[in-house]
Amino acid sequence: MNTTLKTVLLVLCASLPLVARAELKLPAIIGDNMVLQQKQSDPIWGWDAPGTEVTVKFGGQTKSAKADDKGKWTLKLDPVPASATPATLTIKGTSTKELKNILVGEVWVCSGQSNMQFNVGSSLDADLEIATAKYPKIRLISVPNVGTQEPHDDFKGAWSECSPQTVGGFSAVGYFFGRSIHQIVGVPVGLINDSWGGSAAESWVRRDVLEKDPRFKTLMQSTVDREAAATLPATAAKYKADLAAWKKVADQAVKDHKQAPRPPANPEAWLTGNARPGNIFNGVLLPTIGYGIKGAIWYQGESNAGRAYEYGYLFPLMIQHWRTEWKQGDFPFYWVQLADFMPETPEPGESAWAELRESQTKTQFAIKNGGQAVIIDLGEGKDIHPKNKRDVAERLARLALAKDYGIKLVYRSPEFKSLEVQGSKAVITLDTFGSSLQTFDVTEVRGVAICGEDRKWVWADAQITAGNKITASSPKVATPVAVRYAWANNPVCNLYNKEWLPVTPFRSDSFEMTTKPKQ
């Protein structure tokens, strides 16, 4: 190859990055079929050659911004009212892009772990739900599961109209929630599904936020230790040996027509997985942060149940962290309390899942503009993924409809208010939030436990004695000191309000939580 040709090739190669950066590029979250959040200044952003003046036209307004030295540009549209009439958004920089079929309405983020990820096609009455999902004014987009310590600014995905062809793989809770908002409020709805099965709450938080908080010193030290261990040659060698041993056992199981055991987990998989602090924030959430939204719905907690005490301050921190990053103030954030799961226990006692539910309940008082949907009656003992997602979503929708859209609904499950001991009887007062109590199936209240000074829990005989009161007692407890209700992984309980919202599991005591770390 002659010198001149080499020089030309070198020049061409060197210019390739500049050519790539010179192209007007938009993130996946901004594209055809999207829904813009009504009545607020929605950000529009993308990339172009540094210094390029980019102009956006939409709904009679024109906005401009200049790409910075890294090529990023951002501008904000003026607030516009909801509109179900498809519109075009035009972006002009070094090239021009026209985004078609844009609507304006309500946008909600649907996040959490597998019970949010659980799709319409796997839910109760899936065939009917899919066949009737003809809602072109509801728009859907899903973010792939990418776990990384490096901040990502984009993902592979696209908005689509809700239809029998597109809804089957979408979050069931997200879809049913959005459908309720759409049908009752009467505006277009955009749903962003960024859930990841099995994910831990700490993975949804930027790593340095956790590192700076002394409450998470133990969590972050264990993270550093695990990161170091995952990359050791000895760890890799052990995994290789375990894998070989497993293969022999699995092969034999196949020959014997038996179920093979699970293969050993690859230690390095955790590095890009859904539990490493910061991983999901960087790879899944960050590419959507800044997009105009109304609020978020959340269904997670199972993966943190063994650390329920820690969740009591981790979960509120996560919510506030999202709000800080989004720069949209205290947007609505509603979550699903853990359902009932695992075998029923014959005697009352301690429960990590009950403690996690308590941490979720307390979060209502730790943050502004939040709320909880109680589903202690909708779980399945044998399956951590209950199929009835429609009722879950409608309880979440009650929160949004009442608090954000002015619909007069009872939306909050009754909660413990006070305990008064009258001799051998415990009189429990609940806050019923404008409703009153009733039982399901039988007249007596099931699921109430009581204890004396010895802290030995026994089942109590309990009855509703007023619209918001329960009286409980047991011949085994002469003088009650504390009561609990639905305090188990999978409790037998039957107390509701008149709108059939289940009473929130509670305890009157402040005994030390079993999940509190030992000093």
Image: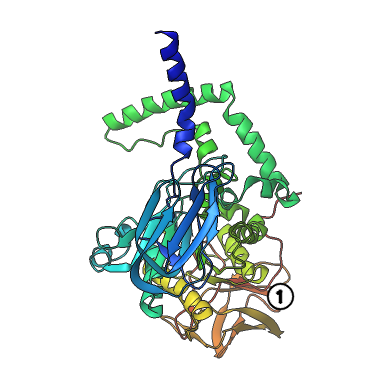
Residue position for label 1: 481
Residue at left 76%, top 49%?
519
Is residue 428 shown left or right of residue 15? right
Q: Is residue 196 above or below residue 472?
A: above
Is any atom of residue 299 visible in this view? no
Q: Nearer the viewer, residue 397 or 511?
A: 397
Q: Can you tell which quarter of the image residue 179 is in?
A: bottom left
Residue lying at the far bottom in this picture: please name it: 466
Is any atom of residue 303 visible in this view? yes
Residue at left 40%, top 58%?
90
Is residue 216 shown left or right of residue 259? right
Residue at left 40%, top 61%?
89
Q: Is residue 455 above or below residue 212?
A: below
Query: How many dots with numbers?
Result: 1
Query: How far across and down, in percent of the image, does residue 31 sit?
Result: 39, 55
Query: How far across and down, in percent of the image, does residue 365 sit?
Result: 66, 71
Please name the amino acid that badge 1 sits on. Val
Residue at left 49%, top 34%?
18
Q: How is the image coloured?
A: rainbow
Q: Nearer the viewer, residue 397 or 353?
A: 397
Is residue 273 shown left or right of residue 513? left
Q: Nearer the viewer, residue 60 or 163?
A: 60
Image quadrant in which the N terminus is located = top left
Query: How far across and down, in percent of the image, does residue 372 sit?
Result: 54, 70
Query: How far across and down, in percent of the image, does residue 422 sit?
Result: 70, 86
Q: Is residue 255 above or below residue 357?
A: above
Please tell me whether mark 1 sits on a helix, a strand or a loop.
loop
